[in-house]
């Protein structure tokens, strides 16, 4: 079988068309890859926010159980206020008084709050109802407020509140 060689007129008109097709293909592919990268970034951000919110809910449940376990101290206001960093006796190994157990609970809970960006906690006692407030900086912004619960009108930090009947 013999194939005919293309005529010189066909060669002259075809010059550069394959190069242009490759260039257009690369532009389209680049736009598609940038879109895919943007979707991946958005997915990772959503996953991280979901992880933080799950952690917050677990921390709220944890301190609620601790309050119910040391009900008498909680009702007397021993757990009230902003949770500050403190050291405490290890009540998991030794018998502790109610006050030592409170200090242990708050110290352990403060350690857990550190897993959140700018994580803070506050407990308020109103007769037999405890309001647990957890705050964190979901956007990791430097200019976020530092109150927990946040001041009215403040959009950052994020706030999760849990009310527990004792």
Image: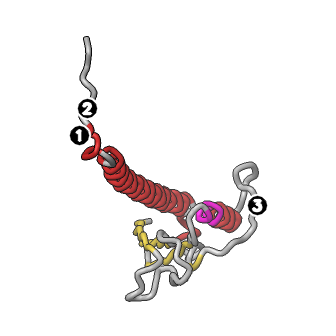
Residue at the bottom extreme?
A: 152
Q: How far across and down, in percent of the image, does residue 40 sit?
A: 41, 52
Residue 107 within the segment the image draws in magenta? no
**Quadrant of the rendered image containing residue 163:** bottom left
Tell whether 48 sits left or right of 120. Answer: left
Q: How far across and down, in percent of the image, does residue 55 sit?
A: 49, 57
Q: Secondary structure at mark 1?
A: helix
Q: Nearer the viewer, residue 3 or 99?
A: 3
Q: Quick one: quadrant of the N terminus?
A: top left
The residue wearing badge 1 is 10
Q: Nearer the viewer, residue 72 or 93?
A: 93
The residue segment tinted magenta is: 109-114
Q: In this rendering, is residue 71 above or below 19? A: below
Which residue is rendered at x = 55% and y = 70% of the image?
74
Mark seen at residue 6: 2
Mark seen at residue 154: none
Mark seen at residue 89: 3
Q: In this rendering, is residue 28 above or below 7? A: below
């Amino acid at each position: 079988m013999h194939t005919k060689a293309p005529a010189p007129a066909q060669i002259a008109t075809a010059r550069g068309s394959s190069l242009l097709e490759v260039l257009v293909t690369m532009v389209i592919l680049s736009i598609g890859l940038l879109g895919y990268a943007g979707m991946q970034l958005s997915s990772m951000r959503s996953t991280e926010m979901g992880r933080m919110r799950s952690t917050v809910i677990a921390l709220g449940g944890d301190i609620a159980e601790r309050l119910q376990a040391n009900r008498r101290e909680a009702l007397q206001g021993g757990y009230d206020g902003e949770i500050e960093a403190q050291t405490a006796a290890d009540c998991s190994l030794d018998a502790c008084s109610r006050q030592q157990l409170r200090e242990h609970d708050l110290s352990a809970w403060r350690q857990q709050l550190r897993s959140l960006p700018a994580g803070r906690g506050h407990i308020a006692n109103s007769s037999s109802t405890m309001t647990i407030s957890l705050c964190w900086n979901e956007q990791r912004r430097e200019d976020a407020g530092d109150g927990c619960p946040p001041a009215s009108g403040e959009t950052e930090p994020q706030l999760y509140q849990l009310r527990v009947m004792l």
